[in-house]
């Protein structure tokens, strides 16, 4: 249990989605910088294009190492939407994964850890 809690901490934070297989940059960043936010309790949120939602996930062990697996509920252009996905660390500051719509599209994605901006004095 302790080890998985420690593993979930490495996924915690805000990640900028930099690329998605199914959608180009114009759609991806249409309203906001596309992102995924993960809390240490496995909850979180995301938005890309006109799709946004809330995450519920956990770190699981696979044959290829650990990954953050999640389900999500939210909206796609104001229509209710839901699905699932997973994210795996490629490096300390990069994620690769997949997000899937229930009975719909599925896309791979890449994300980079958002850096905290220093406040101006």
Image (spheres, helix red, strand yellow):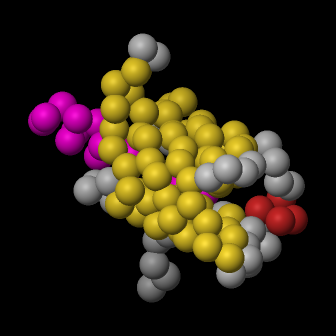
> What residue occupies the far top of the structure in this picture?
63
Residue 36 locus on image (x, y percent): 53, 59
- Which residue is painted at 42% across and 14% down in the image? 63
Residue 62 within the segment the image draws in magenta: no
Is 9 magenta? The answer is yes
The quadrant of the rendering that contains the C terminus is: bottom left
Q: Residue 10: image x %, image y %? A: 35, 42
Q: Position of residue 23 (x, y in %)?
A: 83, 54
Q: Quadrant of residue 81?
A: bottom right
Q: Is residue 9 left or right of residue 107?
A: left
Q: Residue placed at 81% from the left, 48% from the top?
A: 22
Residue 47, by quadrant, is bottom right
Q: Is residue 16 left or right of residue 38?
A: right
Instruction: Using residue 11 as the reference point, say whether residue 3 is left or right of it.
Output: left
Q: Residue at x 40, y 21 (%)?
A: 62
Q: Which residue is farthest bottom?
A: 121
Res 19 visible: no
Residue name at image x 72 percent, y 51 percent: 104
Magenta stretch: dominant secondary structure:
helix
Query: Eyeballing the image, is 120 above or below 50?
Result: below
Looking at the image, which residue sits at the far front? Answer: 103
Q: Which residues are magenta?
A: 1-16
Q: Toward which corner of the image does residue 96 lie, by quadrant?
A: top right
Asked whether residue 30 appears in the rendered view, the answer is yes
Q: Is residue 79 above or below residue 115?
A: below
Q: Nearer the viewer, residue 80 or 43?
A: 80
Q: Position of residue 55 (x, y in %)?
A: 44, 60
Asked if residue 8 is positioned above or below residue 47 in the image, the reply reads above
Q: How many marks?
A: 0
Image side of residue 86 versus residue 16, left or right? left
Q: Quadrant of the N terminus?
A: top left
């Amino acid at each position: 249990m302790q080890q998985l809690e420690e593993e979930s901490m490495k996924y915690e934070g805000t990640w900028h989605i930099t690329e998605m297989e199914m959608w180009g940059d114009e759609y991806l960043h249409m309203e906001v910088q596309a992102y995924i936010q993960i809390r240490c309790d496995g909850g979180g949120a995301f938005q890309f294009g006109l799709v946004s939602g809330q995450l519920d996930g956990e770190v699981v062990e696979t044959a290829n190492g650990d990954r953050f697996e999640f389900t999500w509920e939210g909206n796609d252009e104001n229509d209710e939407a839901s699905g699932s996905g997973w994210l795996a660390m490629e490096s300390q500051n990069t994620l690769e994964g997949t997000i899937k719509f229930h009975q719909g599209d599925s896309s791979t994605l890449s994300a980079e850890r958002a850096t905290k901006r220093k406040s101006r004095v």
